[in-house]
């Protein structure tokens, strides 16, 4: 007959179940934390970044030439 622990093997079965549940919860929060951390390191500029700062970043990365940089900078000013 089941002794009140749903046949999990007594009190140590209950502790094992709690540990497994805690591990699942920890894993869930760990994955959420990792996705937030990875999202902050994206190549996209932050929302409060000005247009000139974005332009400077693109020029520094080599995405645009000096002539393009100067033309776009003149358009922004």
Image (cartoon, rainbow, N blue to C red):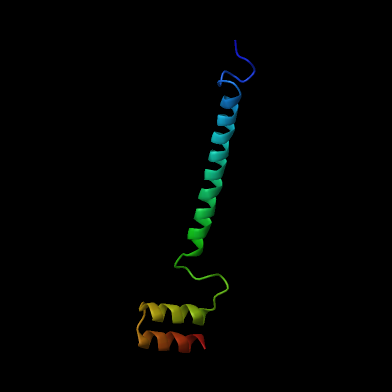
| 33 vs 13: above or below | below
| 38 vs 20: above or below | below
Nearer to me, 20 or 63: 20
Residue 51, percent from left and from top: 51, 79
The outermost residue toward the top is 1
Residue 32, percent from left and from top: 54, 51
In this rendering, the count of numbered labels is: 0
State which quadrant residue 60 falls in. Answer: bottom left
Residue at x 54% of width, y 34% of height: 20
Residue at x 52% of width, y 44% of height: 27
State which quadrant residue 70 falls in. Answer: bottom left
Nearer to me, 77 or 37: 37
| 21 vs 6: above or below | below
Nearer to me, 22 or 72: 22
Image quarter of the N terminus: top right
Q: Is residue 70 left or right of residue 31?
A: left
Residue at x 64% of width, y 18% of height: 4
The outermost residue toward the right is 4
Residue 19, percent from left and from top: 56, 35
Residue at x 56% of width, y 48% of height: 29
Q: Is residue 69 left or right of residue 23?
A: left
| 18 vs 45: above or below | above
Residue 65, percent from left and from top: 35, 83
């Amino acid at each position: 007959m089941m002794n009140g622990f749903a046949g999990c093997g007594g009190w140590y079965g209950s502790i094992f179940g709690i540990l497994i549940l805690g591990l699942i919860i920890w894993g869930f929060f760990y994955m959420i934390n990792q996705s937030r951390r990875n999202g902050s390191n994206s190549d996209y500029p932050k929302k409060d970044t000005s247009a000139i700062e974005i332009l400077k970043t693109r020029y520094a990365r080599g995405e645009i030439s000096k002539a393009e940089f100067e033309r776009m900078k003149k358009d922004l000013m």
